[in-house]
Image (tube, rainbow, N blue to C red):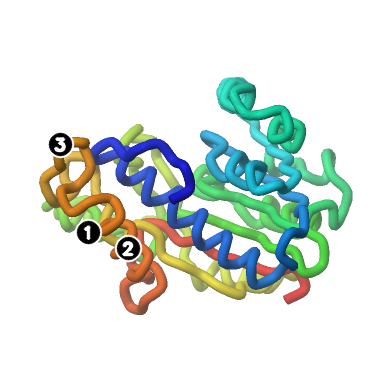
């Protein structure tokens, strides 16, 4: 486990599954592409709660976070203040739009660029992705977490919302089950072509939340006394991790984690 807080049930379960699996998958890609012990230069665009940024800083990497929302920057700065001095010194927070990487950074400035949960809020993602590829060093890793457009009908269908399920076949948009915000989804085949076009072709992909992407009230299985499923969090993560690597399950996950490499 990555040191995440215990999962609350069930929205906390969804978030824990997401962050834990993405962290494991990211570690796997880094281990395959970079020497052990190398301090990497990381850019996290749209850092949300700062989960992956802090995790990578704790692992010894130099992390720059670019976030447009001032309140989010302030919250992550507060969380960072509780970390040891050595970790705080490895994190730089910048308030700014992810589409303006060219104004902040030079080409090839980073070994890793994270863009997790951002494209779902962007109507035209191609310019953003091109800018992210530009700041990657040769051989650098571009990590994207996106809402899966090929699975949009599953959530409403499994909860009996047939009108929404039918509408999902013809629209790339969905509603976030927690906030109700309108989100845009991406298709893997479209992003594969985009990544090839910007010089960071897809080299690996995973499904995230195959079984736990349902709205709060519809996550199956009764919670145990600590708020997690009676089966235990380890069992949930094991099943999700296996499904996220296995066809055909990973293709219908709620989220996709795509990893491109600059220069192939």
**Gap between marks 1 and 3 measured at Cα:** 37 Å
Q: Which image quarter holds the C terminus?
A: bottom right
- The x, y position of residue 130, in whole percent, is 73, 58
The residue located at (41%, 72%) in the rendering is: 245
Is residue 147 in sight in this rendering?
yes
Look at 55% across and 49% down and name the residue there.
Answer: 116
* Residue 25 percent across, percent down from the top left: 51, 62
Compare residues 23 and 44 and report the one nearer the observer. 23
Is 217 rendered above or below residue 24?
Answer: above
Q: In this view, does 134 lie above or below 9?
A: below
For disc 3, the marked residue is: 225
Quick one: label 2 or label 1, which is nearer the N terminus? 1
**Residue 139 on image: x %, y %:** 77, 69
Q: Residue at x 54, y 36 (%)?
A: 48
Disc 2 versus disc 1: distance between alpha carbons?
32 Å
Dot 1 or dot 3: first in sequence order is 1
Q: SS of the residue at dot 3?
A: loop
58 to the left or right of 263? left
Task: Report the residue that reaches farthest toward the bottom.
Answer: 247
Instruction: Specify the label residue 238 is tagged with.
Output: 2
Q: Mark 1 points at which residue?
A: 166
Residue depicted at 76% across the width and 54% down the height: 40
How packed is label 2: few (under 14 Cα within 10 Å), some, or many (20 or more)? few
């Amino acid at each position: 486990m990555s040191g995440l807080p215990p999962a609350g049930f069930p929205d906390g379960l969804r978030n824990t599954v997401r962050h834990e699996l993405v962290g494991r998958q990211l570690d796997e890609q880094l281990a395959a592409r970079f020497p052990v012990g190398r301090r990497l230069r990381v850019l996290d665009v749209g850092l949300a709660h700062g989960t992956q940024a802090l995790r990578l800083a704790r692992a010894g990497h130099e992390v720059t976070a670019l976030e447009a929302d001032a309140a989010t920057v302030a919250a992550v700065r507060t969380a960072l203040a509780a970390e040891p001095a050595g970790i705080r010194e490895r994190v730089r927070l910048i308030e700014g739009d992810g589409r303006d990487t060219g104004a902040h950074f030079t080409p090839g400035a980073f070994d890793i660029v994270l863009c997790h949960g951002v494209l779902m809020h962007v109507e035209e993602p191609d310019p953003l992705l091109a800018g992210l590829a530009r700041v990657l060093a040769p051989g650098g890793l571009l990590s994207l977490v996106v809402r899966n457009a090929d699975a949009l009908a599953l959530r409403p269908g499994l909860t009996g919302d047939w009108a929404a399920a039918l509408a999902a076949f013809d629209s790339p948009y969905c509603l976030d089950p927690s906030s109700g915000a309108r989100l845009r989804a991406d298709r893997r085949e479209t992003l594969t072509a985009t990544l090839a076009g910007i010089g960071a072709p897809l080299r690996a992909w995973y499904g995230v939340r195959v079984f736990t992407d349902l709205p709060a009230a519809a996550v199956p299985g009764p919670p145990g006394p600590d708020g997690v499923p009676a089966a235990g969090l380890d069992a949930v993560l094991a099943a999700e991790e296996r499904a996220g690597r296995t066809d055909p399950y990973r293709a219908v996950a709620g989220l996709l984690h795509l990893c491109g490499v600059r220069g192939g």
